[in-house]
Image (cartoon, helix red, strand yellow):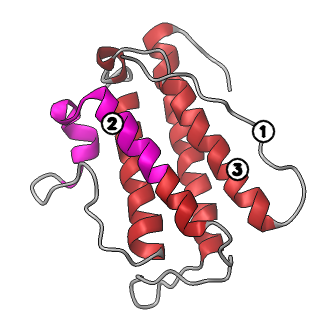
Amino acid sequence: MTIQKPDRPEPVRFGPESLQLPSFLDYYRNTLLDKCSGLTFEQLATRAVSPSNLTLLGLLRHMTLVEQSWFQHRFAGLDVELSYMTPDDPDGDFNDLRGASLDEVERRYLDACARSRELCEGGDLDQFALRTDPGHERDLRWIYIHMIEEYARHCGHADLLRERIDGETGD
């Protein structure tokens, strides 16, 4: 089992933010999948850049948790069990790589992204998240921008990891 190479359409280049922001986020979601595509579980779980504990599998698990946290829990105010994180291991997304099969990791990631899209579809960018810490209110626009930044940073990590694993480079 490997992750299939996704379609990765270019982000919307003009028009309202309500179209551009989700398209950039989807571009980066697919970029992360692209970096993980075609590799075995063992390759995805390889800590390829010592002394870092980052792996492609860990990044995919981490972004599942981040999708759930920002869009489901904070923005929509839903009670959601965050994948991979436990009270004993809040960094389980990076640490417990054997805790789920590759099929399950991919399914959870795709489901989290689909749920995020569903919760935000047609949403007002000025709408505030339902769950925030006092003094840290955030609107949907901020969440999109933050998520694009989070993905861009981790896709950079993924570039380096992938190149160290099998030499593949590219966008």
According to the picture, the residue beneath numbered tag 3 turns out to be: 24
Residue at the spot 57% in from the left edge and 12% down from the top edge:
168
Q: Which of the two marks, 2 or 3, is nearer to us in this view? A: 2
Q: Which residue is mark 1?
A: 10
Decide: marks 2, 3 in contact (CB < 8 A)?
Answer: no
Residue 73 coordinates in the image, percent (x, y): 38, 71
Q: Is residue 112 left or right of residue 84?
A: right
Image coordinates for residue 135, horizontal then vertical, percent: 46, 90
State if disc 2 and disc 1 touch (CB < 8 Å).
no
Identify the disc placed on residue 104. Answer: none
Foreground pick, 95 / 144: 144
Instruction: Rate crowding at label 3 as few (under 14), some (14 to 19) or many (20 or more) other CA atoms within 10 Å.
Output: many
Which portion, as a residue range, is magenta?
90-113
| Residue farthest left in this picture | 88
Side of 147 where 20 appears, left or right = right
Closer to the chain start, of discs 1 and 2, is: 1
Label 3 secondary element: helix
Rendering coords of residue 78 (x, y %): 36, 74
Against 28, is 169 above or below? above
* Secondary structure under the numbered disc 2 in the rendered image: helix
Q: Earlier in the sequence, mark 3 or mark 1?
A: 1
Q: For this rendering, which residue is in front, 24 or 116?
A: 116
Per the image, label 1 sits on a secondary structure element best described as: loop
